[in-house]
Amino acid sequence: MHSAEEISDATGAVSTGSDDTLSSSATTNRKTSTSGANGAEGPIVVKKEKKRSKYRHVAAYHAKVRHSSLTREPNVTASFLGFRNLMVIVLGEIDLASLARALLLGKCLYSFFFASVAMNLRLIIENFMKYGVLICIKCHDYRKQDVVLGSILFALVPYHLFISYLIELTASKQAKQVVGQRKKNGSAEAAERDQRTFRLTWWLSAFFHCINTLLSLGVTSFVVYFYIHHPGIGTLCELQALIVSFKICSYAFTNRDLREAMLNPSMESALPEIYSSCPYPRNITLGNLIYFWLAPTLVYQPVYPRSSHIRWSFVAKRLFEFFCLTVFIWLLSAQYAAPVLRNSIDKIAVMDVASILERVMKLSTISLVIWLAGFFAVFQSLLNALAEVLRFGDREFYTDWWNSSSLGGYWRSWNRPVYLFMKRHVFSPLVGRGWSPLAASTVVFLVSAVLHEMLVGIPTHNLIGVAFAGMLFQLPLIAITAPLEKIKDPSGRVIGNSIFWVSFCLVGQPLGALLYFFAWQAKYGSVSKMEV
């Protein structure tokens, strides 16, 4: 799941200001003196002793200005070879020679769009002849209670970040008092007392941070599951609660280690150079917290790389893209996905396997287009617009996941904010404490599986374990496709990339959508009032 470079990074103590961290073996010097035969003092012998240092949650993963892969910047180039494999899988009959020429001209995405329209034009006409126009703005059951409760949750959940700020502010004041007392009394007993005080402060802070995080996530999940009927509103509320919970955890862990580095300055507690402009506890301010709350990242740093100015034309373009793609997703869902889902209910009820597979294949193209549009809308358009307004410099919200030759490569590249959080605060600390990379990766996927089930099952009021099982099923697929990453022959990478597209986008997503829709129908009936 993780490359060798990342595994070696994981045991590092601190960050040097890039994605890499320092070696986990810090070298300490021990000075000893010897006496000669004449009683004179001999030379000082310096012995180097390797000491394993504890991993610290302060790695500066955002250390330089970077652009998104699909952004048109002078120094940004992207390869779209993975979409070629997708076209062959989805379209089947395609002129590969024309595709190769399109690739050389850098028009892969446009070719994919026009080829998709041409190959699916029959399905579009068939859908219109069979169902007519299904798009209806007033045909959705947005209850007043859903809107009111959703708005209240959206307004109140961010206050949990403010509570975490108060916890850290109290801890920082206590740390400053310890530093002041140490200057007056630098005895060994005082140092030991300071260590006990630090540990007590951390345990108290950790306790209150845990309560704060659990309340943020627990109260939101309870209200969404029992009182917000519409899954769309519920998903937005649950997603916000998860994001805030991630940020609280990162804020707490990072400041804990920054506080320890201030109280115990040493070679092992050296901090990334980028943090020098805002040392602890100067970063414990309301403005610093608000910036982290709004910033398109889940990893807290006292300082982030910043762009020089705001390009408002860039912001307008990205917001226009986001609006258009949101409307496009809604149209596809209402006109094409909804009929396929409804017509699948009776097939699933009688376990007609052949018909279910046919529905999965029919839904796969629609869900794939919706998923690609959703990815572009969120990670390219919305996050880049937000980053531009905040002058957030590191725009690498994703890398070229479409070219992934293994499932592990995909999970490392498609959602970088979550990946960096898991790497910094879950995977790397576990490896640094002696866990094997395989065991740490398993823990990461267990946590991800639980969070995926919460994000899907709670808003749909059906905790049936499909999302949980789907995430765990990624582990054997990662093990199977991992060797393909190391094959130098291009055919190996093509095979791995094809396995990724088929397993994740053409089978996993539509099957999951069918099962959750069936569970919803069995419990409540359709969200839409329209009968097809």
Image (cartoon, rainbow, N blue to C red):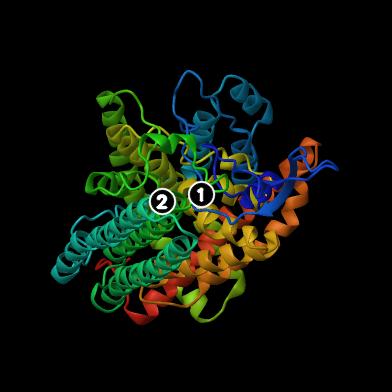
Asked whether 103 or 33 is in front, the reply is 33
Q: Nearer the viewer, residue 310 or 330?
A: 310
- Sequence-wise, the earlier of marks 2 and 1 is 2
Q: Secondary structure at mark 2?
A: loop
Q: Is residue 468 visible?
A: yes
Residue 420 image label: 1
The alpha-carbon separation of the residues under discs 2 and 1 comes to: 8 Å
Q: Which of the 4 image quadrants contains residue 520?
A: bottom left
The kind of secondary structure element at disc 1 is helix
Q: Which mark is residue 292?
A: none
**Rendered view: 105 above or below 390:** above
Q: Position of residue 286 (x, y in %)?
A: 23, 49
- Quadrant containing the C terminus is bottom left
Q: Residue furthest right?
A: 37
Q: Residue 405: x, y in percent? A: 68, 44
Q: Could you tell me residue 82's position as x and y percent?
A: 62, 38
Tell me if mark 2 has few (under 14), some (14-19) or many (20+) residues whose alpha carbon lies within 10 angstroms of its own: many
Would you call the spot at circle 1 few (<14 residues within 10 Å), some (14-19), or many (20 or more)?
A: many
Return the mark for residue 298.
2
267 or 497, which lies in front?
267
Nearest to the observer: residue 338 or residue 144 = 144
Q: Quadrant of the N terminus?
A: bottom right
Query: Where is 450 relative to 331, above or below?
Result: below
Labels 2 & 1 near each other (Cβ < 8 A): yes
Which amino acid type corresponds to the residue marked 1 in the rendered image? Leu
Residue 500 visible here: no
Instruction: Describe residue 324's horizontal placement relative to residue 40 as left or right.
Output: left
